[in-house]
């Protein structure tokens, strides 16, 4: 790929702005300045360690997937009103091509594990109903759990208000009288909150802690993020 196109795709500026950076000697490869915007480079994972802009390693080229510990109060859509989850990432990442997108969504008041990626195939592998990738949530409820709710969720016949197709079986694991783990394999609109509403309860706090075999890292503080490792991404489908 042409050097100026690569850097523009990574969000470092327009093609013209990137060409100016290169002409100013701000771009280097293996500690040697690159002076031609038309130079071709291979956008592989090793390039992020070899190519620099203003003395700093470039951001990883695609495919890029980020693990985020989403705080409450942030929205996952570019079009929703409110603070965007993308505000937690470097500003230039909003100009990347291909664009970064959340892998599914968490509503504004739900916190926890969120993936953001520019890899469309990977995204669809997770959200496709045919894959049955499980998502686990911790829920704090307004009222104590009734003893029959676990069997109700596991039956596979629970209907949500306004829908005509029952939910797939889900696993409820009570922790205390008003808290529980809930594991689902679908991603319907506000599904967890609507499930508890369907059995006469109300979710006061909700946090996602796992997608497939990937758990929210213990060292990732609320609002924190980091680039996902290959083994972490593979664990989702293990």
Image: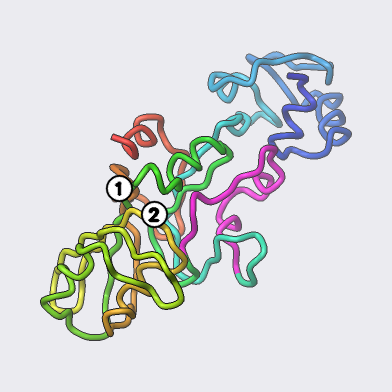
* Residue 236: x %, y % from top left: 34, 39
Quadrant in the picture for residue 112? bottom left
- Residue 60, compared with residue 90, is above or below; it is above
Q: How many neighbours does mark 2 have within 10 angstroms: few (below 14), some (14-19), or many (20 or more)?
A: many
**Count of numbered badges drawn on the protein:** 2
Please tell me which residue is depicted at 44% across the width and 62% down the height of the picture.
188
Tag 1, which secondary structure?
strand
Residue drawn at 66 percent across, 29 percent down: 55
Say which residue label 1 marks. 215
Q: Residue furthest left?
A: 147
Pointers 1 and 2 in contact (CB under 8 A)?
Answer: yes
Q: Is residue 40 magenta?
A: no
In this picture, which residue range is highlighted in magenta?
83-106
Q: Gap in Å between the C-alphas at discs 1 and 2?
A: 8 Å
Note whether 64 is above or below 26 in the view shown.
Answer: below
User: Which residue is at the far front?
Assistant: 164
Picture quarter with the C terminus: top left
Q: Is residue 109 above or below residue 231?
A: below
Task: Identify which residue, 225 or 75, lies in the foreground.
Answer: 75
Residue lying at 70% horizontally and 30% vertically, measured from the top left: 53
In the rendered image, residue 204, in percent from the top left (x then y), is placed at 33, 79
Q: Quadrant of residue 32?
A: top right
Name the residue located 42 percent from the left edge and 58 percent from the top edge.
187
Q: Nearer the viewer, residue 87 or 162?
A: 162
Looking at the image, is mark 1 or mark 2 earlier in the sequence? 2
Q: Secondary structure at mark 2?
A: strand
The reply, left or right, for residue 23 in relation to residue 45 is: right
């Amino acid at each position: 790929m042409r050097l100026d196109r690569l850097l523009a795709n990574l969000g470092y500026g327009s093609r013209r702005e990137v060409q100016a950076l290169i002409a100013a000697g701000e771009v280097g490869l293996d500690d040697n300045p690159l002076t031609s915007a038309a130079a071709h480079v291979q956008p592989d994972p090793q390039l992020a360690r070899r190519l620099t802009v203003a003395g700093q390693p470039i951001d990883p080229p695609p495919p890029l997937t980020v693990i985020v510990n989403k705080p409450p109060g942030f929205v996952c859509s570019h079009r929703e009103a409110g603070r965007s989850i993308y505000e937690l990432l470097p500003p230039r990442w909003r100009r990347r091509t291909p664009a970064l997108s959340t892998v599914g969504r968490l509503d504004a008041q739900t916190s926890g594990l969120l993936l953001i990626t520019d890899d469309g195939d990977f995204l669809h592998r997770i959200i496709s109903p045919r894959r049955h990738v499980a998502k686990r949530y911790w829920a704090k409820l307004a009222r104590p759990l009734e003893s029959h709710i676990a069997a109700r969720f596991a039956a596979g016949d629970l209907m949500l208000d306004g829908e005509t197709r029952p939910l797939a079986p889900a696993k409820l694991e009570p922790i205390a009288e008003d808290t529980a783990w809930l594991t689902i394999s679908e991603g319907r609109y506000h599904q967890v909150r609507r499930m508890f509403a369907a059995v006469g309860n109300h979710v006061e706090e909700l946090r996602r802690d796992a997608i497939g075999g990937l758990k929210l890292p213990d060292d990732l503080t609320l609002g924190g993020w980091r680039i996902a490792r290959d083994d972490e991404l593979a664990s989702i489908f293990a």
